[in-house]
Image (cartoon, rainbow, N blue to C red):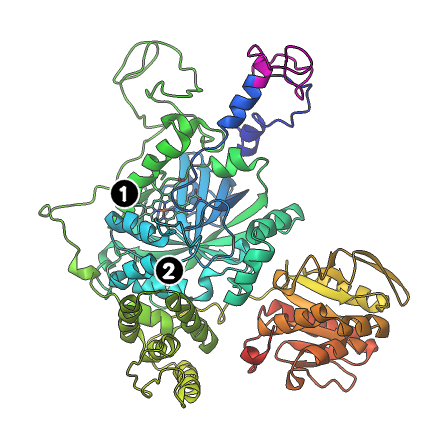
Amino acid sequence: MPSKDQDLASVTTADTEPMTTNQGQPVTDDQNSLKAGHRGPTLLEDFILREKIQHFDHERIPERVVHARGAAAHGFFQVYESLSDLTTAKVLTDPSLKTPVFVRFSTVAGSRGSADTARDVRGFAVKMYTPEGNWDLVGNNIPVFFIQDAIKFPDLIHAAKPEPNNEIPQAATAHDTFWDFISLTPESMHMVMWIMSDRSLPRSFGQMDGFGVHTFRLVNAEGKSTFVKFHWKPILGAHSLVWDEAQKIAGKDPDFHRRDMFDSIEMGNFFEWELGLQILAEEDEHKFDFDILDATKLWPEDLIPVKRVGKMTLNRNPDNYFAETEQVAFMTTNIVPGIDFSDDPLLQGRNFSYLDTQLSRLGTPNFAELPINRPVCPVSNNQRDAHMRHTINKGRVSYAPASLDGHSPAEVTPARPGFVSYPEQVEGPKVRVRSESFGDHYGQARLFWNSQTAIEKQHIAKALQFELSKVGTREVRQRMLGHLEQINDVLAAQVALALGEKVQTNHQTATPPGSADSADQSKVLAAAVTQTTASGGAERTSGLSLVEGQPQSAKGRKVAILAADGVDVAQVKAIEKALTAGGALPEIVGTHLGTLTGVGGSVEATKTFANTSSVLFDAVFVPGGADSVAMLTAQGDPRVFIAEAYKHAKPIGALAEGAALLAAALPKASVPASKGKTAELHGVVSAAEAADVNALGAAFLAAVAAHRHWDRADLDTVAA
Ligand code: HEM
């Protein structure tokens, strides 16, 4: 069996041979068409011209009907220990096996050219080329979904996509048709809480959870079935952007996520996840207050812990976006012996949709022969012909059973057992209904809300304020408030305030903005959020917060070092050393590109205030050098750089004179008072004495690893 890399290499070319047509005829001139006379006309005879233009004319294929914008990478998966007690699947039972994978991340609503940082669910589709055929885990970065039954999927997507009369807005849910549908679909409320949280604004593809969403089955050699939920847990932890930052990035670098993944892999910073399993015995199926077949429900980790069973590493970028990332065809029906479906009605519908949609997107049932889609194990069956058939099937036999030409009437042999569907006992009337066990639409929405920290709750409230205030139809806004009241009255009141509506809360009656005490009301509600979080009184579960319990690492974090001519070069080198030792990626943002002449040498600026911005970095540092800091302080852009980083709760560091730029950009109370040695205040780290650079470097690195510093009380008061 060739490895997947060898398989792909066999059809990969660098086009370094002398130019030919697609038919292999040598081309001497592909820059001038064949003409009658020097000034034309062009001759129809010019087959070189016609072939070149004709191929170009037909270059486009339909984009995916959903998840059109995406980026992908190659890698491998390896299980830690055999899971043979649960499954026969080789990918999960052979710890020596490195299964090749191709993983595509995507947004859902936007078209191929939309921005990476739109507020949206992220697709997390994994294709594993196992020895027993391809296994596709076509998941998302959110563990639940909007709807319970696949028959509603076209409605959901029609409502979320740009409105059909004017094709507005692109890659955004903040519009009437989306919220109209949602407000009439109570089952979506749990998912709404997730997409209004920072989960829909990942910092990078490598810092997102992945979820198979549905309940699946694992089946072992004895035929015993166990229910399972699949999770991908990022080694770097799950971390997010904030909404203001995401919107700005959409303009400054719409390719933010795909660039980040491409660059990271090129420099050897591979993305890694552990595969996690939540396991549920068949006999325990009905022990919970939710139905395990309902894709709007998760299995709380406090009830059913996640067991980490293997690791996936993405370590190679595709060679060609179209041939690989665009032509890859994921299908939920791609499962292998030892893994099986549950009766989740969303999954059952997906099992029709993916194969079906590939036929129109890729244009032929032979899409499985495309290099990126074909399995590494042999393929042998009686399917024949159709557009673009590559395989040359020899002989007379294209039917079964058959005994001619060496064929055996038996389809499977003991040596190569086939896929056997789990013989689940099924009975019941043929009915078009929703099971009563799918009926609770608010319980887990509340669980999610209760499990968030205060800052995460505030981000959810703000996201809802943003989205719903963009809805033009008041009845839709009011309907949504009605749902929010069912989830949490403080949340509902906070959103109502922004919408100019009134709702009853247990804490106080919220007053519409414009009235004398609306500002006070806002404070009361914010305090109420903090109180409920601190008391933790209501039901909560672990695994849902992006702030609590996430691994912290500075690896891959981009740190801007702000500098101008006159910068203290020794300080720059020292802080660069401290950062790179922790895996962070410092880069000098200068007042101009190229060499900055400093004190004690020079440094190279690879970015400038004209071509970059704080939103493209995880942290910012200002080294000393009196002239450098004076020049930076005199300009507007460096001050905005600092203020914006502060507002987005990012780590900020300064050494020696560098603190003057912080003082010029930030409220006085936000800057720690360093009386020489390193001082830290809510992720702002500063040392007046240049000699304290090592302690400062360590403190700053720790602040970078912590991702964001939400304990800044004055975040909303900083103008940037
Ligand atoms: C749990 C719910 C769902 C999840 C996690 C999910 C996930 C995904 C992902 C990750 C992709 C992108 C695949 C790629 O990267 O090429 C995708 C595409 C797609 N999904 Fe889903 N989806 C869900 C629900 C549904 C449902 C209910 C349907 C239809 C009934 C559906 C139909 C499609 C279609 C048609 C595509 C485009 C496939 C292509 O052209 O390659 N999805 N989905």
Instruction: List x then y, in percent, for residue 247.
Output: 52, 61
Instruction: List x then y, in percent, for residue 165.
Output: 35, 49
Q: Which mark is residue 472?
A: none
Q: Would you say 408 lies left or right of 199 here?
A: left
In depth, the one of 623 and 607 nearer the eye is 607
Please tell me in which quadrant of the rendered image residue 690 appears: bottom right
In the picture as drawn, the residue positioned furthest to the left comes out as 429
Instruction: List x then y, in percent, for residue 333.
Output: 33, 39
Relative to 710, residue 132 above or below:
above
Element under disc 1: loop
Give the distance between the C-alpha atoms of the residues marked 2 and 1, in whole angstroms: 49 Å
Neighbor class of circle 1 (other Cα within 10 Å; few <14, some 14-19, many 20+) is some
Residue corresponding to mark 2: 175
Q: Residue at the location (65% across, 28% down)? A: 14
Prevailing SS of the magenta stretch:
loop
Please tell me in which quadrant of the rendered image residue 88 appears: top left
Q: Residue at the location (32% across, 12% down)? A: 397
Element under disc 2: loop
Examine the structure image and report whether residue 638 is included in the region drawn in magenta: no
Relative to 52, residue 424 above or below:
below
Q: Is mark 2 within 8 Å of ligand 1?
A: no
Q: Amino acid at mark 2?
A: His
Q: Is residue 135 visible?
A: yes
Q: Which residues are magenta?
A: 21-49
Relative to 561, residue 112 above or below:
above
Q: Is residue 695 visible?
A: no
Q: Amino acid at mark 1?
A: Gly
Q: Residue at the location (29% across, 80% down)? A: 503
Residue corresponding to mark 1: 223
Q: Would you say 417 lies left or right of 244 here?
A: left
